[in-house]
Amino acid sequence: MSDTSRILCPVLGQRIMSAAEAAELIPAGANVGMSGFTGAGYPKAVPGALAERIRHLNAQPNAKPFRINVWTGASTAPELDGVLAEVDGIEMRLPFQSDPICRSRINNGTMDYVDYHLSEVSQYAWSGFLGKMDIALIEVAGIREDGSLIPSSSIGNNKTWIEQADKIILEVNSKQNAKLEGMHDIYYGTALPPNRKPIMLTDPADRIGEQYLACPPEKVIAVVETAAADRNSPFKPSDDVSKRIAEHILDFFNKEIELGRLPKELLPIQSGVGNIPNAVLEGLDSGPYKDLTAFTEVIQDGMLKMLKSGTLKVASATAFSLSPDGIKEFDDNIDFYRDKIILRQQDISNHPELARRLGVIAMNGLIECDLYGNVNSTHIMGTRMMNGIGGSGDFARNGYLSIFVSPSTAKDGAISAIVPMVSHVDHTEHDVKIIVTEQGLADLRGLSPRQRAHEIINNCAHPDFRPALIDYYERALHSGRGMHTPHLLEEALSWHQRYEETGQM
């Protein structure tokens, strides 16, 4: 250990080794729980070394395929998902991914994928539904004298992985800002039924846990020192479509405040990642709002700006998802942000009890929505996985408002986001309250299925597809079949079939 080492525990200091040496300790077929959530806080050295080991072993004559099962918090980065998928080193992946090589393998059937609600993953692991976790591979910002761990830029499922794994490999990343220490809140009060107790968090600013991850030193088999930055892709500037969607949502908020259904400070915001959510955050920041709060999964660039301006007073999440400019802003002003950002494990950041109690306003993306408000947020044309459901279901079903957003068309107008029937259902009509495209906003609260169909077609569908949707609906309405939710079963998925055959809905 050097004088500047972040490994202060003498016992764990004796277990420092190279990434290649640590990779040798991971056997084929192992269930490996890795840190990482939306490109933050994932291990950056050992996965690459393991991929090289797999490449070498699989090239040997008569070699049996070397694969492992990878469990994370959410998506990671090319240095983890990408390198392991490239060498066909992943047998099964859960619970969320966004890597193009992983996606290709999932959709061609060479990688199994389990798509879970993010709030449920730790319970599945803790209950033994996923099998025994052999190894946890966790990035941390430092190791304290007593062996406790300073979490990195995400927490995700790290608490659960450390508790459940037989063995632990730590990556200590000196590139992570040392002043992250103290921003985390690790709750050790969770339990399985029938021993659960209420989680006493009533405000996004509440701290209910510990600053550090507890880690039994005897379980740690390797410590690897790294100095590598998180994946940090730049966000695209807001385009006209994103800005119009944001305007519809802000107009809706203003009307809800006027009607007394929302306070002027709104309710805690949950926002998915991407250009449209960032456009909404920009709109909120330029409006009359002050002292808002966020109870969400990730801290994005837009939330840093809102904290800086005073629009947002506190943000609770499980990870960062920042652009290069956002990371620089955070690092340069971390003393300002220290008491305004709280990072929690994802079974708390996404907990249904807390989303319901706090009355979260959930804003997430969709791939397609049907006439009655059912939402597909994961599958292209019903069969091809995009990324996964992530935390959208945690918040949509349990939040005060569930808002789903999308441009009204995709593929240069070849695909309509509003279709007669979704080709895959992630969020049923019972959990979807608001649909927004650049065309307008459909408020589905209190409406019957037929009333919802009128709202969605007239307010959200693109004009190029609106006549065909009206035609389908009216013929279904007069088909003599069930009138509660009218459908023409022989045509309900014909739009998808037509796209598959012709490239145009």
Image (cartoon, rainbow, N blue to C red):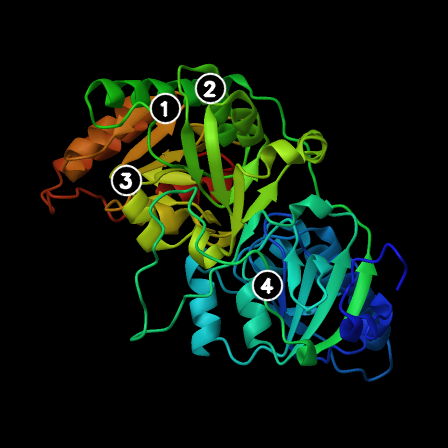
Helix, strand or loop for disc 3: loop
Assess whether mark 2 and mark 1 are in contact (beta carbons under 8 angstroms).
yes
Residue 400's tag is: 3
Q: Amino acid at mark 2?
A: Gly
Residue found farthest to the bottom: 62
**What separation in Å lies between label 1 and label 2 (alpha carbons)?**
9 Å
Label 1 belongs to which residue? 249
Point out the frontmost of discs 2 and 4.
4
Sooner in the amino-acid sequence: mark 1 or mark 4: 4
Q: Amino acid at mark 3?
A: Tyr
**What separation in Å lies between label 3 and label 2 (alpha carbons)?**
21 Å
Q: Amino acid at mark 4?
A: Leu
Sooner in the amino-acid sequence: mark 4 or mark 3: 4
Point out the frontmost of discs 1 and 4.
4
Label 4 belongs to which residue? 213
Assess whether mark 3 and mark 4 are in contact (beta carbons under 8 angstroms).
no
Binning the other alpha carbons within 10 Å of mark 4 as few (below 14), some (14 to 19) or many (20 upward) gives many
Assess whether mark 4 and mark 2 are in contact (beta carbons under 8 angstroms).
no
**What separation in Å lies between label 4 and label 3 (alpha carbons)?**
32 Å
Residue 94 visible in the displayed image: yes
Q: Tell me which residue sits at (13%, 40%) in the image.
A: 479
**What separation in Å lies between label 2 and label 4 (alpha carbons)?**
37 Å
Residue 364 visible in the displayed image: no
